[in-house]
Amino acid sequence: MVRYPTFLVFLTCIFIGCLITTFPANSVAQVTKIMGKVVDSKTKEPVPFANILIVGTTIGTLTDFDGNYSLELKNTKAESITASLLGYSKITKPFAKNVFQTINFELVSENLDLPEVIIIYTGNPADAIIDSIVKYKERNTYQNFNKFQYDAYTKIEIDANNITEKLENRRIFKPFKFVLAYVDTSTINGKSYLPILISETNSVIYERKSPKSKKEIVQATQISGLENTSVSQFFGSMSQEVNVYSNFTPLFDKNFVSPIANSGHDFYKYFLVDSTFIGNKWCYHIMFKPKRKQELTYTGSLWVNDTSYAIMKIRMRIAEDANINFVNDLEVDQEFQWTDDKFWMKTKDVLLVDFNVIENAKKVIGLYGHKTTIFGNFVFDTIDYEKVFALPSDVTFEKHATDKHEEYWIESRPEALSASEEKIYTMVDSIKQVPIFRTYKDILYGVMTGYFPLKKLEIGPYSKLFSYNEIEGARFRIGARTANSFSKKVQLEGYIAYGTLDKTIKYGAEVMYMFDKNPRRALIASYKYDVEQLGMSPNAYATDNILSSLFSRGPINKLTMVREYEVSYEHEWFNGLINTLTVNHRELFPLPGTDFVIYPEGANDTVYTNSIYTNEIGLGTRISFDEKYISGEFYRVTLKSQYPIILINYKWGIPNIFSNDYGYQKLNIGIQQWFNLGTMGWSKYVIDWGKTWGTLPYPLLKIHDGNQTFLYDDYASNLMLYYEFISDEYVNFYFSHHFDGLFLNRIPLMRKLKWREVVHFRGVYGSLTDANLNYSEFPDGMRPLGNIPYLEAGGGIENIFKIFRIDAVWRLTHLHDAENPNAKSFGIFGSVYFSF
């Protein structure tokens, strides 16, 4: 995981927002901001599609389906605003300049004598226009070029919102009162906010359709606020490119139905509300809203050209009751232009996200993530880009990209920063000088990561300070690692542990040296002398984690003492291909008071040994096309890829070195993929095949991954015991599907809970040669699978209180084997599961 994982980034920003926010919303506003509601004066019902106009200008808008509107004005000389609609009397009201204000209207109906109108078209004209948009999608989205380049200016701003007066007198905020002058108010939802981070990037982007490739050359970048680059990466990645012409627009791993999807009529109601010129193009203005509750849909409006039926503008917000966590609001604004008299190109893309750990919170500090990208200077098929597409990384920084002066930014920005945005750089630098700020930040970091920062050292993790198992008894462990302030090239890590029952000291150490971060080049050397649970999935909680002790389903008494020396080198050739070369020496020791029993020449030739030695050289390959990451200084986590991820690992066991008598080869090939299924949710599958060549004692064969805790493990057979099945050739298969509330959302009493359904299936099939079956004595209960695969099926409910998941699992085979006649056929498992 990265030093600031995704959820930690979110909470860190909220915490810092809490620290630096203390006063009511209207302390400053550099532009005139107006929002309000229009209702019928008699019924008090909202009036949708009412015209809102700034008197003496062409600036205006329409009210939405709930009668709401909002406007932002810069340097205006106007002083009044009107609301009007056919059948109502026009109302004009004054407004104040350079402040935020709420102006509501109550329209009074009037009797009008209208001439008779004969309606010939009996359908909804908006539906007919939507049908034409869908019909001409390919013409408007298929661009007749293979390669092109363009400039992109990206501005990301992070704001703490829900700023209230009650925060003013809290002791924790008193050192930060100097930031009062920076609080503002949003016209999206009326929440007060304080900017805490801003970043700007100027890039040139190159795209190729066949073979598909996209490269970004960052010419200039600057960031203020939180110093960790993972923050800007997180909020940058949140705004995946939203292609409104696609049937589904993926946001936060959810598939929202586009308002111009081929099946849009099944999800939306459309209303034709206006027609006007945008530039020299005559456009229809259509508003849309969802047909049903809690579906992943939008509400908003679009402007479409009357002849090409190409979208020129679109503004949409996710449905208010959409089943998505931690996101109270999300708005997408896009603009398109007719370019070179040939192509429709997107020229502006704006995304605003309102994050909060509490749904629809009005008083709890949350975050705005606001990203604006402006595209321009398009060049089509006229330049040779092969050198660019040959670059190993998808994103490359020019040498002096971070050294640009303010004069550069003033000249290069396609739109100027507002006065409040310009002050963020100064404000945040001032906050960092407050001594107690560092203390607050360290406390939060320790709570969320498990490591407490102590200058250039971090102590932890806390979850491993104490645990218990039947071999060691009470286990005490203390560990530490160097912080980024020590070095951004070298990380040192180590620990020491002691068990009260075996009275043995265990320890481990690791050093990592980063040659480069993009592409990744790293050298890692490690040593450990500690107990290990063979047959445990890499996804499981380690046996020395307190959670494994608390939620164990049986005694933890099958641990093996291991001494291991390892050196590995990671080399990323380009984004999507990484190799890892590993050299490993490993010593395995049996449980106290026992020996490994080997039959090298058959049952009549018995060897008792207290150790097994191996020496390996391994080569790992990871192929992950178009995979995106959030990177820290030393680690990174994937943000998933829409394409399969292929893992190939080969190991060669070298005999006759350091008392090693075992020569062997191992090959493992795995493939996994995460993919959306539209409104049906999303699925994940994992297929893993492996084979071992050589005659070996059981610890060196494939001991299949079991689970003896009540914590559900995606990568293990949850009702299989540790040391239950063994193979030298095998295939694992796992499939899960997450319905994201598809069925429960349709049950009125369940809908409010926002629970989500998940189903899963697992199969393991393996074989064991007679040579390996007869070579060593197996522990009690361990056996080959035989002719019957191990099968499990289950289902569960996730999103319980937004973070918990409960699974029911049924074991379908190997229920009455003589070696395990009391195998459990059913189990209930829990887990902590974060998902948007």
Image (cartoon, rainbow, N blue to C red):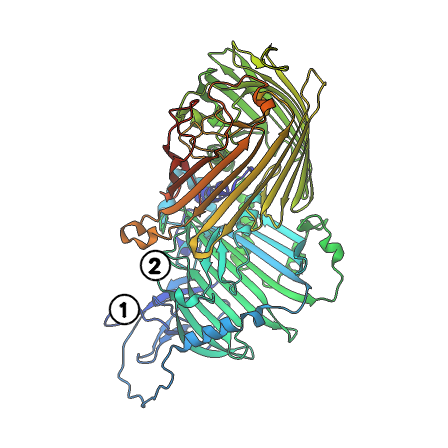
Amino acid type at image mark 2 = Lys
> Is residue 322 rendered to the left or right of residue 243?
left
Callout 1–callout 2 Cβ contact below 8 Å: no
Residue 731 versus residue 773 in the image, above or below: below
Residue 469 versus residue 387 in the image, above or below: above
Q: Quadrant of the N terminus?
A: top right
Residue at the disc numbered 1:
45
Label 1 to label 2: alpha-carbon separation: 20 Å
> Is residue 287 rendered to the left or right of residue 116?
right
Which quadrant of the figure has residue 55?
Answer: bottom left
Residue 61 versus residue 715 in the image, above or below: below
Name which residue lies at 40% across and 23% down. 554
Would residue 89 be seen by someone viewing this image from the given angle?
Answer: yes
Amino acid type at image mark 1 = Glu
Residue 138 coordinates in the image, percent (x, y): 56, 70
Residue at the disc numbered 2:
293
> How many labels, in total?
2
Near-viewer residue (26 or 598): 598
Residue 579 coordinates in the image, percent (x, y): 68, 38
Q: Residues within 10 Å of mark 1 (few under 14, many from 20)?
A: few
Near-viewer residue (782 or 583): 782
> Is residue 166 rendered to the left or right of residue 774?
left
Q: Residues within 10 Å of mark 2 (few under 14, many from 20)?
A: some
Name which residue lies at 46% across and 11% down. 501
Under circle 1, the secondary element is loop
Q: Residue furthest left?
A: 42
Of badges 1 and 2, the one in the foreground is 2
Residue 10 versus residue 413 in the image, above or below: above
Residue 145 coordinates in the image, percent (x, y): 67, 67
Which quadrant of the figure has residue 613?
Answer: top right
Under circle 2, the secondary element is loop
Near-viewer residue (172 or 681): 681
